[in-house]
Image: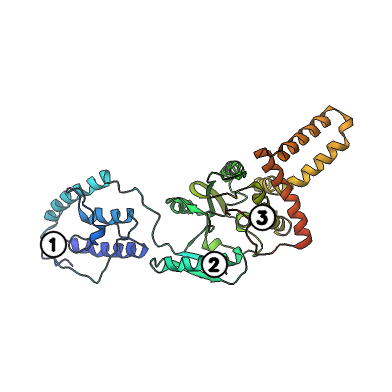
């Protein structure tokens, strides 16, 4: 509290500053302190450059170390301000010299995470693997984390319930086995500065495969496709380990659907955009072996066939996005059927000319390479065949909302 006796109006500025600090503290940490009254844990104290000041340097240094710097308005100190605006002006010149030194030389922007004010909700789909205990242990020391135990209903049902029980304007989703780079959330949400953007998915890569899986090669191609689609307007599919949606645009989809395929086209149908942010990165371990990945793909493609055949994907789409959906989604999931048709027609027409003989020969070489275990050939054949097996399973048994994970790490 400043007790003014002259022309200095510093007290007006400090009333504004207190409002700013209160807001920053609510979001997580203040960006500046108050030299008249502050406290630091001994274990967190930092000996800064003597030319720096604690007011500006200690808060951001705490945050860079994964700690918080907060404001307590009920702890009050009183002092007299300088008697005039002219005197305050000279004091401010001296003070801002130190501020410029810290701003330009203090490495203020290193290792800063996204905005605080983040609520972390772990939606447990009736987990029996110890997940609940682990989350509760973290929540006991971190108030922004909480466990939401859901009745067994599948991933999407748990996500829908988590959305209903949170209040944030931006919803960010991840998978339990994924890890994000420290700046990923900030880079995701910056895309929402564009009011047309409703959905953003980040980039994704795999740690080095321990076995025969070549999923990483596929994802590098997928990243190129998403980047190209995003430049044209909207992507046709997201990435489960890292994506975000505006709360006002979130859609409670059928629990048997998946957000990765359903949310982007639903945004476009509502006149919104779904974009790709390659700099917001997440990573995970792939399934160890291609056989494990094949089983995962069969399960995943069952859900994709459900959306393609029952999700009304082609309604209210512009011509460019319609071509993208047909080529990247419909033709992709039909690739196994198209390969079967190509192989059958090549066999039937092999005596009709050289072109059919070359086509059949190329296909037989691909199948031979796959049978011999050549990495990329085996991956391509098994994943393509998974689209056929998944369609048959979908037509025979339907698609459950829940599943048991495939062998391996995913």
Q: Secondary structure at mark 3?
A: helix
Give left or right: position of 74 versus 24: left
> Which residue is the site of mark 2?
124
Front in this rendered view, residue 320 or 309:
309
Asked if disc 2 and disc 1 are in contact, CB closer than 8 Å, the reply is no
> Which residue is the site of mark 3?
300
Question: Residue at left 47%, top 63%?
Answer: 169
Give left or right: position of 104 versus 87: right
* Chain-order first, disc 2 or disc 1: 1
Above or below, 361 relative to 234? above
Front in this rendered view, residue 176 or 258:
176
Residue 22, position as x, y percentages in the image: 31, 65
Give left or right: position of 134 versus 268: left
Quadrant of the image for the C terminus?
bottom right
**Eye-nearest disc, 1 or 3:** 3
Residue 87, position as x, y percentages in the image: 11, 54
Front in this rendered view, residue 281 or 328:
281
Q: Secondary structure at mark 2?
A: strand
The reply to whether residue 320 is visible in this rendering is yes
Question: Residue at left 75%, top 54%?
Answer: 391
Q: Secondary structure at mark 1?
A: loop
Q: Tell me how far mark 1 sits from mark 3, CA to CA.
A: 67 Å
> Which residue is the site of mark 1?
81
Q: Residues within 10 Å of mark 2 (few under 14, many from 20)?
A: many
């Amino acid at each position: 509290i400043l007790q003014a006796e002259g022309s200095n109006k510093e007290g007006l500025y400090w009333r504004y500053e207190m409002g700013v600090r209160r807001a920053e503290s609510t979001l997580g940490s203040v960006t500046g302190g108050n030299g008249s009254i502050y406290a630091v844990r001994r274990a967190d104290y930092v000996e800064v450059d003597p030319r720096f000041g604690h007011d500006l340097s200690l808060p951001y240094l705490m945050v860079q170390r994964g700690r918080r710097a907060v404001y307590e308005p009920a702890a009050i100190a009183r002092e007299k301000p300088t008697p005039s605006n002219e005197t305050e002006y000279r004091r401010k010149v001296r003070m801002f010299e130190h501020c410029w030194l810290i701003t330009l030389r203090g490495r203020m922007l290193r290792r800063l995470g996204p905005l605080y004010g983040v609520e972390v909700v772990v939606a447990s789909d009736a987990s029996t693997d110890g997940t609940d205990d682990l989350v509760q242990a973290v929540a006991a020391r971190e108030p922004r984390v909480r466990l939401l135990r859901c009745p067994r209903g599948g991933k999407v049902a748990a996500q829908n319930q988590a959305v209903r029980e949170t209040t944030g304007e931006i919803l960010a989703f991840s998978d339990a086995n994924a890890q994000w780079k420290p700046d990923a959330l900030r880079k995701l949400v910056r895309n929402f500065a564009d009011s047309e953007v409703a959905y953003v998915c980040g980039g994704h890569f795999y740690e080095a495969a321990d076995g025969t899986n070549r999923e990483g090669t596929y994802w590098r191609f997928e990243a190129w496709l998403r980047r190209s689609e995003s430049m044209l307007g909207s992507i046709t599919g997201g990435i489960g380990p890292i994506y975000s949606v505006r709360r006002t645009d979130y859609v409670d989809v059928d629990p048997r659907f998946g957000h990765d395929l359903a949310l982007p086209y639903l945004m476009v149908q509502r006149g919104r955009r779904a974009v790709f942010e390659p700099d917001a990165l997440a990573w995970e371990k792939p399934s160890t072996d291609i056989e494990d990945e094949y089983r995962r793909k069969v399960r995943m493609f069952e859900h994709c066939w459900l959306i393609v055949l029952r999700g009304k994907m082609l309604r209210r789409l512009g011509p460019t996005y319609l071509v993208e959906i047909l080529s990247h989604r419909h033709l992709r999931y039909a690739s196994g059927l198209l390969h079967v048709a190509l192989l059958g027609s090549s066999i039937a027409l092999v005596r009709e000319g050289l072109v059919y003989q070359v086509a059949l020969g190329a296909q037989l070489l691909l199948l031979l390479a796959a049978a011999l275990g050549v990495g990329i050939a085996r991956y391509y054949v098994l994943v393509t065949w998974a689209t056929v097996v998944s369609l048959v399973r979908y037509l025979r048994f339907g698609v459950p909302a829940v599943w048991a994970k495939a062998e391996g790490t995913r």
